[in-house]
Amino acid sequence: MGPLPERAAETTAEQPWPVRVLSLKIADYVDKMSQLWVEGQVIQFSPRGGTAFLTLRDPDVDMSLSVSVSMNAVNAMPIPLTQGARVVLQAKPTFWTKRGTLQLEARQIRPVGIGDLLARVEILKRTLAAEGVFDADRKKPIPFLPQRVGLITGRSSAAEKDVVENARRRWPAVRFEIREVAVQGSTAVTEVCAALVDLDAHPEVDVIVIARGGGALEELLPFSNEAMIRAVAAARTPVISAIGHDVDQPLLDLVADWRASTPTDAGKKVVPDAARETALVTAGRDRLRLALGRRVEVERRGLRSLLSRPVLADPVAQVRVRRTEIEALRGRAAVRMEGRLTRAGDQVEHLLRQVAALSPQSTLDRGYAVVQHRDGRIVMDQDDVGIGELLRVRVARGDFGVRPVSDGVDTPPERDAPARGTSPAGSRTTSTGTSTGTSKGTSKGTATPTKRARRTAS
């Protein structure tokens, strides 16, 4: 088997490093690191003889390192070291090759002073304010009557009791969705943020209350943590901050949509007062009843005033006047219509007389006759008539046929014989253009010779 590769990049599947080689190389790399100062929160503290073992956790995220420190350095601290304390220590990173773990060997350990913590909180406050996290225009309104209230508080804490009891005292039907978490210590930030995300996603939770009782400044520091502040700013549900007392003001109060001075104040804010709302409704109904009563009385007085007027004292007076006018108009219309009908009747009668006077029948009624050929042509000239031609003669009452027996030349009449051009009554044979019976005129274009025959006979 050949020599082992010197560098990690030179290893292959055929020439790998054994675990011991990798562990030794990591230990050698870590040993080259210089001493450093690191800050964190003590979440586990276990003294064992002359050495104390503790876990140092980042206060903002869930990351931690194991630390070993001599008890002499721990005892040299001005205050006793406890779990949850914020410390800064000088340490040298070391790698334990047997188990492959990284830890810090601390030389010195110091508590973080309150002044330092406040200075850091102030720096964070300015940074977030510059980003607009605390702006009033991004805050959401608190619902008047939430369907369900989300409550994040400590386990079996007095703050939970204050919020729930005061809310139910004001509105007995209020419902809560409670998440009990650590509100101080190393896990407070992560647990509160997780509960906030959970309640923010709940479909029935309309408002979230984060409540904690009073405490020392260092105990309230988780509520000034940047991770928690940004989680509250990103929540879609309105958040009420009820941390500590009125004098306490963590950064959560600035980012929350509404700040309650105490958990009791939050219980009063989250729901309306049923008794007060009932009183408001009753007062509103009373005012409405009085307003309606006054309005009805005003309208009643106005109605009485209208009824007292003469026109309404006798409501049918106007109807009678209008009825008289209508009857007069109807009479005038009837007279005019009757006059028009009379004039129209006279005009029709006059037209009928004109038509009768101009009618061919009236001419026939005066004794004239119309002589026609067989084809219906009217005889207009005696030269158009041939001897023996069958002609049609139309008189006032009927028609008959005739045949001419001469050419129309006058001849002396014989004694005791009828004149030429005449025939006994009822005779069907006459001369040209002569009709029998009482015919004594001429037709259109054709005249009968009856008068001439009588003159010759005389």
Image (cartoon, rainbow, N blue to C red):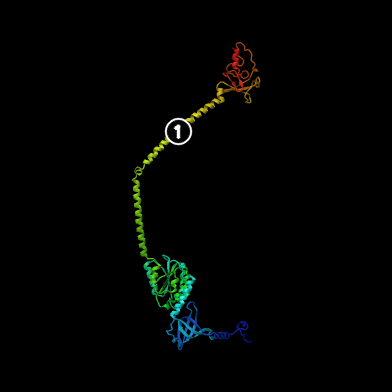
- The x and y percentages for residue 97 are 54, 86
- The x and y percentages for residue 403 are 63, 20
- The x and y percentages for residue 64 are 49, 80
In front of the other: 161 or 213: 213
Q: Quadrant of the N terminus?
A: bottom right
Quadrant of the rendered image containing residue 157: bottom left
Quadrant of the rendered image containing residue 259: bottom left
Residue 1 visible? The answer is no
Residue at screen point 39% across, 38% down: 323
Q: What is the tally of numbered marks visible in this picture?
A: 1
Q: Is residue 408 left or right of residue 154?
A: right
In front of the other: 325 or 25: 325
Indicate whether 18 appears above or below 193: below
Q: Quadrant of the C terminus?
A: top right
In front of the other: 196 or 249: 249
| Three-letter amino acid code at the position of disc 1 | Arg
Q: Under tag 1, what secondary structure?
A: helix
Indicate whether 425 appears above or below 356: above
Residue at screen point 59% across, 20% down: 442
- The x and y percentages for residue 370 are 59, 23
Residue at screen point 45% across, 33% down: 336
Residue 350 visible? The answer is yes
Q: Is residue 413 left or right of residue 336?
A: right
* Disc 1: which residue: 336
Indicate whether 38 appears above or below 246: below
Q: Dot 1, how many residues are within 10 Å of its Cα: few (below 14), some (14-19), or many (20+)?
A: few
